[in-house]
Amino acid sequence: MGSFAWGSFGLMASIGFLLGMRHATDADHVIAVSTIVSKERGLLKAGLIGALWGVGHTVTIFVVGIAIIVFKIAIPTRLGLSMEFSVGLMLILLGVLNLSGVMQRWMSKIDHVHEGISLAGHMHIVEMTQERDGRLGGWNMTRPLAVGIVHGMAGSAAIALLVMTTIPTPLWQILYILLFGIGTIAGMMLTTACIALPISYTSRRFSAWNHRLVYASGLLSLCFGLFVAYQTGVAGGLFTAHPHWTPQ
């Protein structure tokens, strides 16, 4: 593979990892994980949530990136807008769940049903004990993973196209995207831990302020989600006859 293969790619790999970490701090990413982490009390759980978000994000970017790089697939304008519009919908949903407390009430109803069935009730107690011990339940693990997958859809095309213009070999392009994803996972773990610090502090000392942080994260997610939905659906022309979209 010559001197470029290891010399230049070593530099590109480092850049890819660092750009992945920076990518994790994009506004829509931070807002999304903030709504999830806002109800967590431990830094380790928050870091795991960030890692799961990063894994979901990386899976989508990797799959879409391979399709673009290897099979030369061009993403239609309306599909690209739809992927970005889905991010807006996800942010709106996360914001609404935080503001209304729907998820807490739904989980509470499930708790009551489980209490009426001895075996199911026992399993529920085990799950709750695990969560108190610092581990995440099934739903808390699935949610950041799903959010990360949706967010990956919005940025995958731009990342793949950028890589195609800077790295000439398809194999190195794929490896670059993988390293970019690893950087994103690391960056999001650090980001969620930083977000969880004030939340953990206020939850133990100022419960009123903790509730305000939860509601603030929900309101921010809702507003930003509406903005993204408007930008893609109206300004981008998703719901018109002449959509226009530039991967970014």
Image: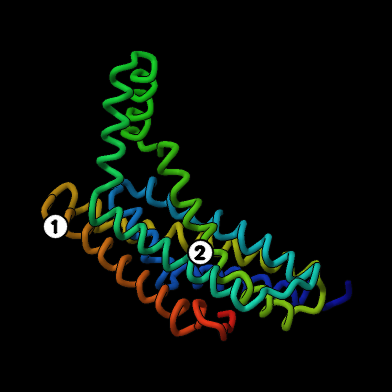
Amino acid carrying mark 2 in the image: His
Question: What separation in Å lies between label 1 and label 2 (alpha carbons)?
Answer: 29 Å
> How many residues crowd around disc 1 within 10 Å: few (fewer than 14), some, or many (20 or more)?
some
In which quadrant is the C terminus drawn? bottom right
Q: Residue at x 31, y 37 (%)?
A: 107
Most distant residue in the right direction: 1
**Disc 2: which residue:** 151
Q: Give the side of residue 171 with respect to residue 26, left or right.
A: right
**Residue 221: horizontal and vertical position, in percent?**
32, 65
Q: Residue at x 35, y 49 (%)?
A: 43
Residue 5 drawn above or below residue 51:
below
Badge 1 marks a residue whose secondary structure is: helix
Most distant residue in the top direction: 118
Q: Residue at x 38, y 50 (%)?
A: 46
How many numbered discs?
2
- Taking the image as drawn, is residue 18 in sight? no
Nearest the eye: 88 or 216: 88
Residue 210 drawn above or below residue 187:
above
